[in-house]
């Protein structure tokens, strides 16, 4: 019985490790450096990782700033709202951040400078531009010189 339990635990650990995302292992993004633009928010529809036209315009602008200002680190923190379960929301937050990171790289930002963070379920940021539900479905770009 103990042997079966140990085999099950090992198999479960292996299955979970194979299902891990490609996000780099950092827990949050640093604030934008003085003189660097940001934070820049890319908003998403419920359950979506699709970047709309307004989001792409912000990404293009962020990429131009990153290249022109010789930004050393571009960090993207994805978030999801509280709908659904926590594990699915974490995965969604990482996928949103990865979508923005890939779009920045396509716009010419050096991939070695880009970091991705999944925040999971969001709880609003301390800004007044959006309501909490919008900001909880976002990816935030910060830049460090």
Image (tube, rainbow, N blue to C red):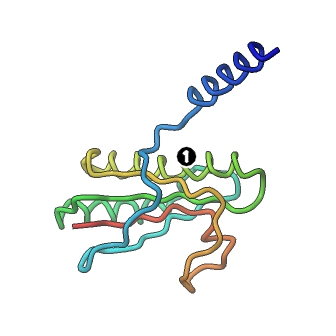
- The quadrant of the image that shows the C terminus is bottom left
- The quadrant of the image that shows the N terminus is top right
| Residue at image mark 1 | 95
Percent position of residue 120, x then y? 62, 56
Name the residue at the front extreme.
Answer: 2
- Report the residue at 63% width, 50% height from top: 90
Percent position of residue 31, x then y? 37, 72
Badge 1 crowding class, 10 Å Cα cut-off, few under 14, some 14 to 19, many 20 or more, is: many
The vertical placement of 113 against 126, above or below, is: above
* 126 vs 49, nearest the viewer: 126
Question: How many marks do you count on the picture?
Answer: 1
The image quadrant of residue 70 is: bottom left
The image quadrant of residue 43 is: bottom right
* 127 vs 24, nearest the viewer: 24
Q: Does residue 31 appear left or right of residue 44 in this picture?
A: left
- Report the residue at 24% width, 48% height from top: 110
């Amino acid at each position: 019985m103990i042997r079966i339990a140990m085999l099950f635990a090992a198999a479960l650990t292996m299955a979970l490790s194979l299902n891990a995302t490609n996000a780099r292992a950092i827990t949050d993004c640093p604030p934008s450096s003085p003189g660097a633009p940001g934070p820049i928010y890319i908003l998403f529809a419920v359950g979506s990782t699709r970047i709309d036209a307004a989001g792409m315009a912000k990404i293009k602008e962020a990429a131009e700033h990153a290249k022109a200002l010789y930004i050393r680190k571009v960090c993207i923190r994805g978030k999801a709202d509280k709908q659904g379960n926590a594990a699915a929301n974490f995965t969604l937050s990482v996928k949103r951040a990865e979508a923005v990171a890939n779009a920045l790289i396509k716009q010419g930002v050096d991939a070695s400078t880009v970091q991705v963070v999944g925040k999971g379920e969001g709880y609003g940021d301390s800004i007044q531009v959006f309501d909490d539900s919008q900001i909880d479905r976002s990816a935030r770009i910060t830049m460090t010189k």
